[in-house]
Amino acid sequence: MSFKGFSTEDFETFDIDGLQPRMEAIQTRIQPKFEEISNELKSDLEVLVGNEMHLHIARHLRRTKNPPADTWMAFSHNNRGYKKHPHFQIGLFDDHVFVWLAYIYELPGKKDMASMLLSNIDQLKETIPTSYMVSTDHTKKSASKPIHDVNLEDALTRFRDVKKGEFLIGRHFRSDDPLLKDGEKFIQTIKNTFETLVPIYHMSMKEEITKEG
């Protein structure tokens, strides 16, 4: 089944009160679409990165009371998980879709990763379009800002020095953006976004392999 796009109902999922009712809506409305997106994107992403990538869909299993404010899918080279590695995310809040290359706080050796990115900051600035977004906390909408409003050096220094510091870079699409209603165009846009971010991902993986080695 091919991806047809996101609907208003998908975003209204996050208006549902209660953990269990909202989780049921996430599972029935959104997670099947994540599977469809993966079916359309995964092989292209694997060609771009040069190795196998594995789909991980957020299950929100640690939640016992508060319903999630967002939900997401992730692609990682590791089939056991994604949080400890540079990874690609696609997900939804109540008012937008986000597409990230993500480095979150669980990443081991994030000080070294941040230092590597800082040492290549000129390349980052050349690679990242001015229409892209940067976030320093994947859990908060307010932590996302247009890249032209962000001091990249400050953001990466925070990622390096603050225990819960994160660095995510990518794109936002408002819930009323017509692109989200057109599955084919959305998929192509995500492919283009991944293509833009892959050079940064490659730098990251070289750093990770060096530390693991």
Image (tube, helix red, strand yellow):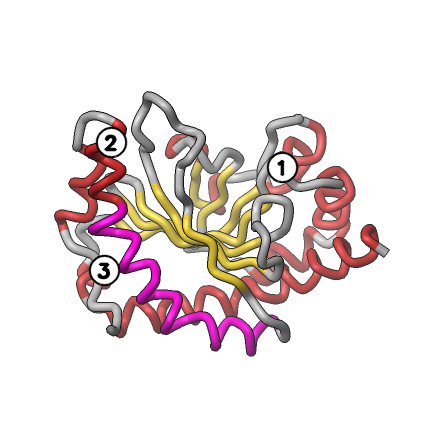
Q: Position of residue 108 (x, y in %)?
A: 71, 40
32 vs 28: above or below: below
56 vs 143: above or below: below
| Residue tagged 3 | 180
The amino acid at mark 2 is: Gln
Q: Counting other residues with Cα less than 10 Å from the Cα at mark 2, is it few (<14), some (14-19), or many (20 or more)? A: some
Q: Is residue 171 visible?
A: no
Query: Residue 25 lies in magenta, yes or no?
Result: no
Dominant SS of magenta comes to: helix
| Residue tagged 2 | 20
63 vs 72: above or below: above
Q: Earlier in the sequence, mark 3 or mark 2?
A: 2
Quarter-of-image position of residue 183: bottom left
80 vs 24: above or below: below
Q: Position of residue 8 (x, y in %)?
A: 13, 49
The amino acid at mark 3 is: Leu
| Residue tagged 1 | 106
Q: Quadrant of the N terminus?
A: bottom left
Q: Tell me where the magenta segment starts and ends, as one range.
A: 27-49
Per the model, the C-alpha gap separating discs 1 and 3 is 30 Å
The amino acid at mark 1 is: Glu
